[in-house]
Structure formats: structure tokens, C-alpha cells
Image (tube, helix red, strand yellow):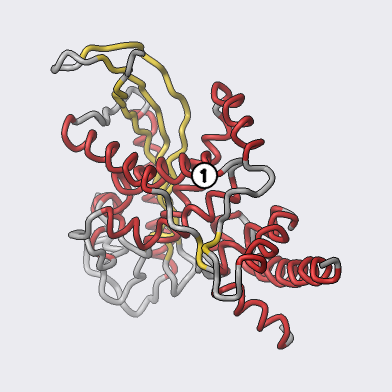
């Protein structure tokens, strides 16, 4: 990059993004407080988790084998297939974590313990986390289905 | 089995300040997340929705993963922005809100020392950049991600991310020059 472009880049870096509004903080606070206090979020396993689990285990085993095969022959571990924790082995670090929303079902109105009305929404996700070894090319991808139940307070006007 | 247990409990890999409250994290990362979200949504209000959803998802499900929080937070917010765009039921309201700030009345940067006009000119030029260049520029400069992290985020090679960044900088400077010439 030429000097002029570098100066321009430096100018851009001086710009500070605006601070999120107070309303946004309050909304986040309300959502986090609600889930902590009322267990509004209630992850449950669902039937196809049992189908996905063998696939996840098979993938993990295959990746473990690849990592194991690519590690130096001079350091044979005795017995344990410890890939991520062996002191001289690859140090995996998480590089991405995604929650892909597959489906959201509105299950209608429910009455909470305090008598107030709320809407129950059931959401199905696939959570995928990828770890990588910064020193090598090995990576590990872990996907698991998750179901979340959210209870959203309803205000009638 | 050992491997599976490790992957589901990755906490020891990095030192994450687990005792921090979400407010501390939000003070630190909120402005950057909002700016990034603004690139993937049609209105400032939608960007706030995406930040809320992405941040809450991260805080509940991914905080314990360890590693650098910002790339994971940005991924979570980006995913929330994409989910938001897919929700047809909210389309009409969203489009109305997009129209409301289509003229750029909602600033994305705090006013720098050089003055509000310069800030407004940069924001305007930024909006005119091709989205694929703008994404890389925002993630690099204000998201403070590496080219490798940007590449992982956008599904590119690191070299492509780096070259898009250079093109974006040059294009933005060009836009600014044109704006300066026209007063």
C-alpha cells in the first residue's frame, strides 16, 4: 500500500463506532434475566439427535485418526488417544461457532405461574463449532441439534 | 470417547474471564458488533435486533468455548442477521424501517475530531461500496479481525480477503476524492 492509502487507513481506524442505545442494553438485560430467572430457555434433546449422534461420533473419530496419523511418529502416546490435550500435540482453538435456526414454531399462548400471559415459541437449531490447530492444518467440526423453548411475555392493549 | 468429551468441554483451551458480567463484554464489543450488524441488515433497528439475538446466543451457549471472543461474537451476530432477513413475517415492518433510515440519518460512527462533515462523507462513501468489499473493510478496520478470521467468516480464502480489503480502501479513498471535488 502507498503512503497515502496508509494515511487514509489510519484515519478510518480513528473513527469509533457509535455506542449501542440504552434501549438495546435494556432489551438484552431483560432477555438474559428472564432466561436466568424462569428457566425460559429449556434445551431438550429431540428424536433426531439420536440419529445425528453416531454421525458426530464417527466424524470425530475419523478426524482424531487423521490428526493422530499426521503427528510425529517419534512421540507415540501410550494407550490414550488424547489428541487435543497431549502436551506436545496440537492445541486446538475454537475459530467459529454457529447456531443455525432450522425451524421456529409458535405454540400459542400459555399462562405463567404468576397468571400473566406469554407466547411459547419452540426453535430448532444446529449448533456447529469448529476448532483448528493454529500450528497445523488439522481441524475439528462438531455439530449437534438443539431445541430451545422461549417464553415471550405478551402485553394486551 | 475421550476426544468427544474434550470437544464438548473446551474450557481449558483459553483463559476466558468467566467472572465478567455481560455488561462489561457489551461495553467492550457492543459498538463493533452494531457496526458489523449494520452491514448485514437493512436498517439500524434491524441491526440492533441482530446484535441482541447474536449476543444473547453467544452469552448463553458459546461463552464457555474460550478462544478470542470477538470472532465468535461476530459470527453469532452475522448468523442472527441472516436469520432475521429470512423471517418473512417481519418483512413489511422491516422494509418500512429500512426506508426510514435509507437516507443515512442514523450515523454509524461517533463524530471524530476532524468533524461531522468528514464523518458523514466517509459513511456515505462506505454505503456506496460494493457489499463484498464493505464487509471485508468493516471486519478488518472496526471488527479488528485478521484476514484469516475474515476469510473464515465470509467463506473466502485469506488472499481474497486481503485483496478485497486493498480494493475497498482504494475505492473508498476514490469515493472521498470525488466527493471532495464536488464540494
Q: Who's the residue at 75% across and 72% down the image?
A: B173
Q: Who's the residue at 34% across and 56% down the image?
A: B26
Whether residue B54 sits left or right of residue B93 in the image: it is left
A107 or A132: nearer the viewer: A107
Q: Quadrant of the N terminus of chain A?
A: bottom right
Considering every residue shown, the one lying at the far bottom of the view is A3
Q: Who's the residue at 53% across and 70% down the image?
A: B146
| Above or below, B149 relative to A26 | below
Element type at mark 1: helix
Q: Quadrant of the C terminus of chain A?
A: top left
Q: Residues within 10 Å of mark 1 (few under 14, many from 20)?
A: many
| Above or below, A155 relative to B61 | above
- Count every numbered label the image shows and give the total: 1
| Above or below, A20 relative to A29 | below
The percent coordinates of residue B61 (x first, y second) are 31, 45
Whether residue B136 sits left or right of residue B32 in the image: it is right
Q: Who's the residue at 62% across and 67% down the image?
A: B158
Whether residue A42 sits left or right of residue A103 in the image: it is left
A45 or A5: nearer the viewer: A5
Residue position for label 1: B47
Amino acid at each position: 500500500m502507498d503512503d497515502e492509502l496508509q494515511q487514509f487507513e489510519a484515519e478510518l481506524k480513528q473513527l469509533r463506532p457509535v455506542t449501542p442505545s440504552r434501549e438495546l442494553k435494556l432489551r438484552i438485560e431483560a432477555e438474559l434475566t428472564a432466561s436466568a430467572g424462569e428457566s425460559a430457555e429449556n434445551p431438550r434433546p429431540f428424536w433426531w439427535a439420536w440419529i445425528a449422534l453416531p454421525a458426530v461420533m464417527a466424524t470425530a473419530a475419523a478426524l482424531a485418526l487423521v490428526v493422530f496419523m499426521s503427528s510425529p511418529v517419534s512421540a507415540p502416546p501410550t494407550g490414550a488417544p488424547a489428541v487435543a490435550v497431549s502436551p506436545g500435540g496440537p492445541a486446538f482453538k475454537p475459530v467459529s461457532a454457529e447456531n443455525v435456526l432450522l425451524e421456529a414454531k409458535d405454540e400459542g399462548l400459555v399462562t405463567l405461574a404468576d397468571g400473566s400471559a406469554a407466547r411459547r415459541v419452540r426453535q430448532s437449531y444446529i449448533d456447529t463449532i469448529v476448532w483448528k490447530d493454529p500450528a497445523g492444518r488439522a481441524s475439528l467440526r462438531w455439530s449437534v441439534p438443539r431445541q430451545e423453548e422461549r417464553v415471550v411475555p405478551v402485553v394486551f392493549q | 470417547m475421550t476426544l468427544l468429551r474434550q470437544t464438548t468441554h473446551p474450557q481449558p483451551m483459553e483463559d476466558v474471564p468467566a467472572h465478567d458480567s455481560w455488561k462489561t463484554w457489551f461495553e467492550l464489543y457492543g459498538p463493533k458488533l452494531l457496526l458489523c450488524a449494520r452491514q448485514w441488515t437493512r436498517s439500524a433497528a434491524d441491526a440492533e435486533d441482530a446484535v441482541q439475538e447474536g449476543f444473547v446466543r453467544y452469552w448463553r451457549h458459546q461463552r464457555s468455548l474460550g478462544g478470542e471472543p470477538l470472532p465468535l461474537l461476530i459470527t453469532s451476530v452475522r448468523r442472527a442477521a441472516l436469520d432475521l432477513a429470512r423471517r418473512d413475517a417481519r418483512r413489511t415492518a422491516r422494509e418500512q424501517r429500512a426506508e426510514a433510515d435509507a437516507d443515512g440519518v442514523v450515523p454509524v460512527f461517533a463524530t471524530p475530531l476532524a468533524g461531522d462533515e468528514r464523518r458523514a462523507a466517509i459513511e456515505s462513501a462506505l454505503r456506496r461500496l460494493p457489499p463484498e468489499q464493505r464487509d471485508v473493510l468493516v471486519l478488518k478496520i472496526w471488527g479488528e479481525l485478521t484476514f484469516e478470521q475474515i476469510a473464515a467468516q465470509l467463506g473466502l480464502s485469506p488472499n481474497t480477503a486481503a485483496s478485497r480489503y486493498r480494493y475497498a480502501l482504494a475505492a473508498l479513498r476514490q469515493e472521498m476524492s470525488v466527493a471532495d471535488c464536488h464540494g
